[in-house]
Image: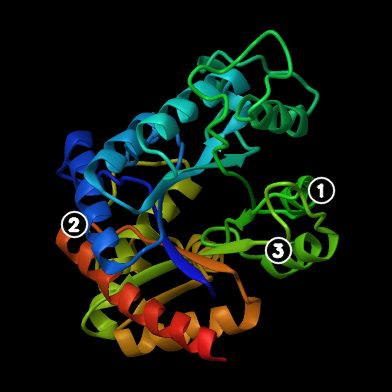
Amino acid sequence: MQEFSLLDLSPIPEGKTAADALANTADLARAAEQAGYHRFWLAEHHNMPGIASAATAIVIGHVAAATQTMRIGAGGIMLPNHAPLVVAEQFGTLATLFPDRIDLGLGRAPGTDMATARALRRHMAPDDSFPQDVQELIGYFGDSPRGAVQAIPGAGTRVPVWILGSSLYGAQLAAFLGLPYAFASHFAPDMLEEALSVYRSMFRPSRTLARPYAMMAAGVCAAKTDAEAEYLRSSQVLAFARLRTGNPGKLPRPTDDLASQVPAPVLAQVMRALACSATGSAETIRQQLGDLVERYQPDELLVTGMIHDHAARVRSFGIAADVLRDLRSMAKVA
């Protein structure tokens, strides 16, 4: 593991507002920078009452302005929702305002329901144009315009583009294009091992990347004790269960009794989806994260986690940073 980074969805806790969530995101980013996180990524989600990062490029600018050196980016932008030129202009502008600090991760899913996808006004074509859209977008960031249309700002910024995925499709595309790859194992871990193997074995060097660079995501909820961490994590488990059952809302307050609020079959599904994670004290998450790093050998680990209390969330990522720094040092020695 060469680096460790943080993914934030800008959660809106019960009893709070989107304004609170965005302020919390900037505060968390400042703390993450001080703690040594390499990147701070935000994700595009729409029509989600508990997530404030829908206008992802704007939130990235908000976070970049609140920090100094840490890389800030999208993990990711759901490209089917947008014209590649618009994304190129947005991230070209960000890269112009914050040189050498902006990343662009691209996802193939719409990141929302079909009704919201239609409301985004994108043409719902039956053909999959994602590979072509990715290449068109990368072209806008190059030094030499390929046609009459240019992204201004954007041209010449060479914003690093990542492919995101939770299946083999993204792994194959990232390998074919010679791009860095990030797997969404924090909520869809089942194909992680196979996807990393496909990406690494099929990778073709490109002008931007000489060898494969793979990032995996993992949930983290750290606290002083294992019991406290399990309690704090119940908010995310409950939120995920409500989403799975068609009842999304703001991030719930934690509970000591998940079993009474979530049917057993649903809870089992949620725990399987969130299995790539570490929950507990510093000692406990050291073992759990260490096992993940040893098994999958990621070049970079992206951690994420939603906790209702903002101060507790900042502490959680601070504990995780201490652990990840040690794991990184051990990996370099080895």
Question: In this picture, is 268 found above or below 159?
Answer: below
Residue 94 in sight here: yes
- Give the Cα separation between the discs numbered 1 and 3: 19 Å
Rendering colour mode = rainbow
Q: Which badge, 1 or 3, is on the more N-terminal residue?
A: 1
Residue under label 2: 310
Question: In this picture, is 124 found above or below 248?
Answer: above
Q: Position of residue 260 (x, y in %)?
A: 33, 65
Residue under label 3: 191
Q: Quadrant of the C terminus?
A: bottom right
Dot 2: within a 10 Å radius of its alpha carbon, few (fewer than 14), some, or many (20 or more) residues? Answer: some
Q: Residue at x 59, y 40 (%)?
A: 106
Q: Nearer the viewer, residue 158 or 324?
A: 158
Name the mark on residue 176. 1
Residue 322 picture quarter: bottom left
Mark 3 secondary-structure assignment:
loop
Mark 2 secondary-structure assignment:
helix
- Give the Cα separation between the discs numbered 2 and 3: 32 Å
Q: Position of residue 144 (x, y in %)?
A: 68, 24
- Give the Cα separation between the discs numbered 1 and 2: 41 Å
Name the mark on residue 279. none
Looking at the image, is mark 1 or mark 3 nearer the viewer? 1
Q: Position of residue 210 (x, y in %)?
A: 73, 58
**Amino acid under label 2?**
His
Quick check: 180 left or right of 318?
Answer: right
